[in-house]
Amino acid sequence: NPVHKKVPVLVHNDKSIVESQIILEYIDETWPGHPIMPQDPYDRAMARFWANFIDDKCLTSTWKALFWTRGEEQRKALEEAEENLGFMEKELEKKKLFGGENFGF
């Protein structure tokens, strides 16, 4: 995507939409008969929470631990990454899929 310099990008009707969560919301609004996001407001809020948690916490701490730091700072980042992934694992142990019983976001 040369304009926004981001991926993923969805091009629909010659218009570009970027950012994963925005793309998902656009798809749900454009094709409401096949929703990706949960229809229940609470479940939809939780899906957004976990998407943000993964982006803001899990990915950042994992990248820090693997590539961006060394020494003591790397050790702390690794502990943070393990803790964040532990939160996700605990959430997932009760469910067949991350969204519950249905495939989606």
Image: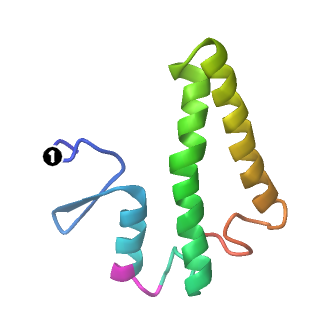
**Residue 70 visible somewhere in the drawing:** yes
Q: From the image, which quarter does the C terminus lie in?
A: bottom right
Figure disc tally = 1
> Which residue appears at 81% of the width and 56% of the height?
90
* Residue 5 position within the rendered picture, expressed as x and y whole percent measured from the top left: 23, 41
Residue at 59 percent of width and 35 percent of height: 61
Query: Of 10 and 82, which appears nearest the observer?
Result: 82
Left or right: residue 92 compared with residue 62: right
Residue 93 screen position, x and y as percent: 84, 60
Where residue 103 appears, x then y in whole percent?
A: 64, 70
Which residue lies under the disc numbered 1? 3
Q: Give how far across and how far down residue 98 sits, in percent.
A: 69, 64
| Viewer-side residue, 99 vs 91 | 91
Examine the image and state in which quarter residue 66 appears. top right
Q: Disc 1 marks which amino acid?
A: Val
Q: Is residue 65 left or right of residue 93?
A: left
Vertical relation: 34 (above or below) 85: below
Image quarter (top left, top right, bottom left or bottom right) of the N terminus: top left
Segment colored magenta: 29-33
Q: Nearer the viewer, residue 31 or 78?
A: 78
